[in-house]
Amino acid sequence: MLINVHDFEGVAAHKLSQAAYDYYRGGARDEISLRRNREAYSQYAVHYKVMAGVTEVDLSTSVLGMPVSMPILAAPTAFHGMADAGAEAASARAVTAEQSIFILSTLSNTPIEEVVQAASGPVFFQLYVYKDRGVTRDLVRRAEAAGARALVVTVDAPTLAIREKDTRNRFTLPPGLVLANLTGTGKETLEGGGLDTYVQRQIDPSLSFQDLEWLVQLTKLPVVVKGLVRPDDALRAAQIGAKAVVVSNHGGRQLDHSPATLHCVSRVRQALDSQVEVWMDGGIRRGADAMLARCLGASVVLVGRPLLWGLAAHGELGVRQVFQALRAEMIEAMLLTGCSRLEQLGPELVERL
């Protein structure tokens, strides 16, 4: 019986190739940051309320003015085609059926037009800034034309940190899978090398706040900045025009001495005007983890690997089941904490041990 994210990962591990499983689960170098993200949740205690009279829990909220049924969104993750033939279209159908938001990676195996068409709710587009600004501009225009509702710009990948599992596996995309959003640009394959080689050749390591200014001016879509852990970086992004920031260390896949994102979110929230949303990802495996992040200042959290485990285990249905499990766990945690609404979750409920 599959009842939690860890169960789905166990099934996924048997279904996926070793290279695909290692790619999805792995982190940079010694995987210090990968472990930190997960361990951070055990370092807080919740001082729950009793006799609070809570009989029902309402998890609904909004993201950039768009209603969602719970504060758990789909993080942008690459190469869903390795997990299931339905790829990103199946993931998007599942996530939006649960009345959440799907964020599509630039490095998807399904073109954005098909993903937006498959979804029954909002799709955001995660953007890598290419050295070729014409390619970057075309990606933005394509996302706008397809109906994406926001741009999520990843800023923590000036180069790709070595993920040693991928190096040992000589990871590359399986035959038949391409970077579907880059078709026709000459940048749609990994060119016989690994993802690290592709990023070194194509993604701009000189990305700066001036480039963020250019993107904000380029599009009418709300711009979200993903991949920061510092309050000063968050503040500068907001001053340029970012509507939200994502406290993220790329799932422990970039700098291997990054702090756990859960430890960073409070300071980022305090640094920003309340109109700028603070999202967070990293290590979330339980609904109670999402509740903790909300207490510490994240309006919503993003989950990446859990979605992939669901997709690999049981396709579209598996993704829905993962989101349903996280929803049920968060409702349970809030009931036991004595809170019926997300607005009741705050730092006064938690203690760092």
Image (tube, rainbow, N blue to C red):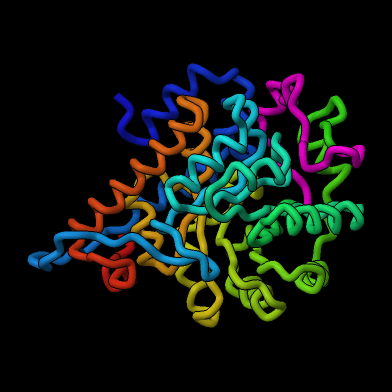
Query: Where is the C terminus found, in terms of image quarters?
Result: bottom left
How far across and how far down the image is residue 118, in percent?
Answer: 60, 42
Specify start and end residues of the magenta stretch as a single range: 158-187
Q: Is residue 262 above or below residue 1?
A: below
Q: Main secondary structure of the magenta part?
A: loop
Picture quadrant of residue 188? top right
State yes or no: residue 127 in magenta.
no
Left or right: where 353 falls relative to 194: left
Q: Nearer the viewer, residue 33 or 295?
A: 295
Q: Nearer the viewer, residue 164 or 26?
A: 26
323 w.r.t. 275: above or below: above
Identified at 60% across, 50% down, the residue is 103
Q: Residue furthest left?
A: 51
In terms of depth relative to the viewer, which is nearer, 349 or 141?
141
Residue for point 53% across, 34% down: 308
- Whether residue 204 is visible to the viewer of this picture, yes or no, is no
Q: Position of residue 250 (x, y in %)?
A: 61, 49
Residue for point 68% across, 28% down: 166
Q: Nearer the viewer, residue 174 or 271?
A: 174
